[in-house]
Amino acid sequence: MSSQAAVPPAQQSIPWFGLIAVLMGTFISTLNSRLSTFGAADIRGSLHVGFDEGAWITTAQAVGQMVILPVAFWMGTIRGPRRVLIQAAVAFGLISLLIPFAPNYPVFLTLQFSSGMASGFFIPLTIGFVVRNMPPRYWAWGIALYALNLEFSLNIAASLEAWYIDHLNWHWIFWQNVPLAAIMAACLYFGAARDPVHPNPPPPDLYGFAAGGIGLALIYAALDQGNRLDWLNSGLVCGLFLAGTVLFVAFLVHERSTAHPATDLKAVFSGPLPRLLVLIGFLRLTLLATAYLVPQYLQVVRGFRSLEVGQSLVWIALPQLLFCPLAALMLRRTDPRLVACIGFIFISIASLTVAYSITPQWGPDQFLKTQLMQAMGQSFALSGIVFYAILNLKPEDALTFGAGIQTARLMGGEMGLALVVTLARVRGQVGSNHLGTHVQSGAAEVITRLHGYAGAIGRGNPVVGSERAFGVLQLTVHRAAIIQGIMDTFVALGLATALALIFAVAQKPAPIGPASHKPFIPRPGEARS
C-alpha cells in the first residue's frame, strides 16, 4: 500500500500497456534482424562493399545481442526490467537513427553491433515481465502474443523491405525502428510499475559477463559465417569455434565456483527446462528454414522479386492473428503438451507435403495450403512449449529462463539455418551430379530437347537458337538440382519434427500452477492461501 501511494499518478501501472511494450521489443528485435538480411544487397551497394565484407552486416548485430546477454540478465535482476528496457529502447532508437549516416563500412558495423547490444535486452526480459507483472490468468495470452510477435515479424520482413526499396530507400530499414522504439519506451513508462531497487545488490561478475557473452558471440559468428567460408576448411571459422568453446567452458566452470555468479546454472539445468530450451531452439530452426527455403525457391527457380516473395511469406504471418487467440484459449483449457504436439504435427505434415508435391511450376499460390499449416503449427508449438516451461518455473527464475530463451532462439536458429543451408546446398550438388550423368552429349533425348529450345528461342535464326539452347538446358538442370535439394531438406525437417513430437509427448505433466484454469479446492482442514 505504501509503495503504491509513493508512486506518482503518472506512474500508476497499466499492465496491458507494459505487455504491449515488451512484446513490441520482441517484434522490433526480430524484425530488424530480418530486414537487415533481406536488405543486405542494397546496403552493400550503398556502402560500396562486396559480398564477403557485407556478409558481416547481419552477423555484427546478432553478435552484439549475444555479447550483452549475461549483462542484460544481471541488470534486469538488479535494476528491474522496466528501467533497463526503457533505457535500451531509447538507445536502440537513437542508434537506428544514426546508422544510415555512417560515413564508411567500419563505422556502419560498429553501429550495427551497438544496435544489437541495445536490442539484446528486449527478448530476455520479456518472459520475466509477463510472469512478474501480469495476473496469472493472463499468462497464456501473454505467451501466445509472444509467439505471435516472433513469427509475425519474421515473415513480414520481406514485404516491408521490398516496399521500402521500391518506394523510399534502404535507410528506412533502420529508421522504422525510431518510432517503434519511442512507442515501446512510452508504453513502459506509463504501463509498467516501477521496479523495486535491490537493497543489497551483489557485485557484478565481470569475468562471467565477458567469458559467457564473448564465448557465445564467437560461436555464433562461426556458425553464421561457416557456410560461406566452407566450415572447417577455413582457419577463421576454426579459430572462432575454438576460442568461443574455450571461453564458454571457462564461463560454466567459473559460474559453478564463484560466490556471485552472473547466471544461476541450477535454474537453467534443473527440471525439464534444458529439454524445453532444446525444443525452442528446434522450433527456431523450423521457422528460419521455412523463411529461407521458400524464398530460395521463388527467387532462384522462379525468378521472383523480393516483393513477390514477401507476398508469399505474409501468408505465414497473417494467420497468426487468428491462431494466436486460439492457442491462448487452448492453453487455458488443455494440457500445454497437447497444444505443442498439435503444432508439431502440422509442421511435419506441411514440410512433407512440400517435399513430395513441389514442382518447377509452383508459385506463391501453391505454397498457400502448406504455409497455413506451417503458421498454425509454429504458433501452437511455440506457445505450448513456452507455457509448459512457465508452469514448471519458479517466479524468481523467470529472468533466467528469458535469458535461456534468447540463447536458444539465436543459437538454435543459427545452428538450424546453417544446417538447412548446408544440407540444401550439398543435396543440390548431389542432385546436379546425378542429373548430369543423364545429360550426355549426343544422346537422342538431349538432342531433341536442344532442338526444341533452339526452335523456341531462335525464331527463324537457327544459329542464335542453337547457341542459347545450351544455356537454357544448363539452367534447367541447375533449377532441377536446386528443387531436389529443397525437397530433401523439407523431408529432413518433416522427420526431425516428428522426432520432436515424440520428445514433447514424453514430457511429464506440468504442475498445476497459478496460471491454471482449475480452481483451488481445499482439502479437509486445509485453508485457501
Image: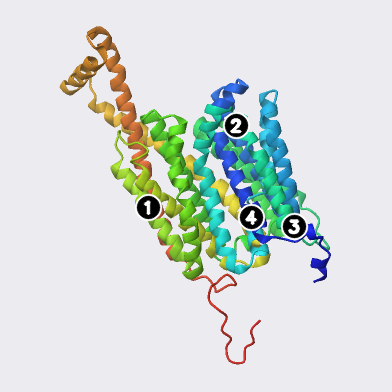
Label 4 to label 2, Cα distance in Å?
A: 28 Å
| Label whose residue precedes the other's in the sequence (4 or 3) | 3
Residue lying farthest to the left in this orientation: 444
- Could you tell me residue 386's position as x and y percent? 54, 60
Residue 77 visible in rendering: yes
What residue is pinned by disc 1?
348
Residue pictured at 24% horizontal, 7% vertical: 461
Q: Is residue 339 left or right of residue 430?
A: right
What residue is pinned by disc 3?
80
Q: Is residue 419 left or right of residue 13?
A: left
- State the SS at label 3: loop
| Label whose residue precedes the other's in the sequence (4 or 2) | 2
Label 4 to label 3, Cα distance in Å?
A: 12 Å
Residue pictured at 41% horizontal, 31% vertical: 299
- Could you tell me residue 235's position as x and y percent? 57, 31
Q: Are marks 4 and 1 in contact (CB under 8 Å)?
A: no
Residue pictured at 43% horizontal, 33% vertical: 308
Q: Are marks 2 and 3 in contact (CB under 8 Å)?
A: no
| Label whose residue precedes the other's in the sequence (3 or 1) | 3
Q: In terms of image quadrants, where is residue 343? A: bottom left
Give the amino acid at mark 2.
Trp
Q: Is residue 352 above or below residue 388?
A: above
Label 1 to label 2, Cα distance in Å?
A: 33 Å
| Label whose residue precedes the other's in the sequence (4 or 1) | 4
Q: Are marks 3 and 1 in contact (CB under 8 Å)?
A: no
What residue is pinned by disc 2?
56
- Could you tell me residue 213's position as x and y percent? 67, 46
Label 2 to label 3, Cα distance in Å?
A: 33 Å
Residue pictured at 64% horizontal, 55% vertical: 126
Q: Which mark is residue 126?
A: 4
Foreground mark, 1 or 2?
1
| Label whose residue precedes the other's in the sequence (1 or 2) | 2
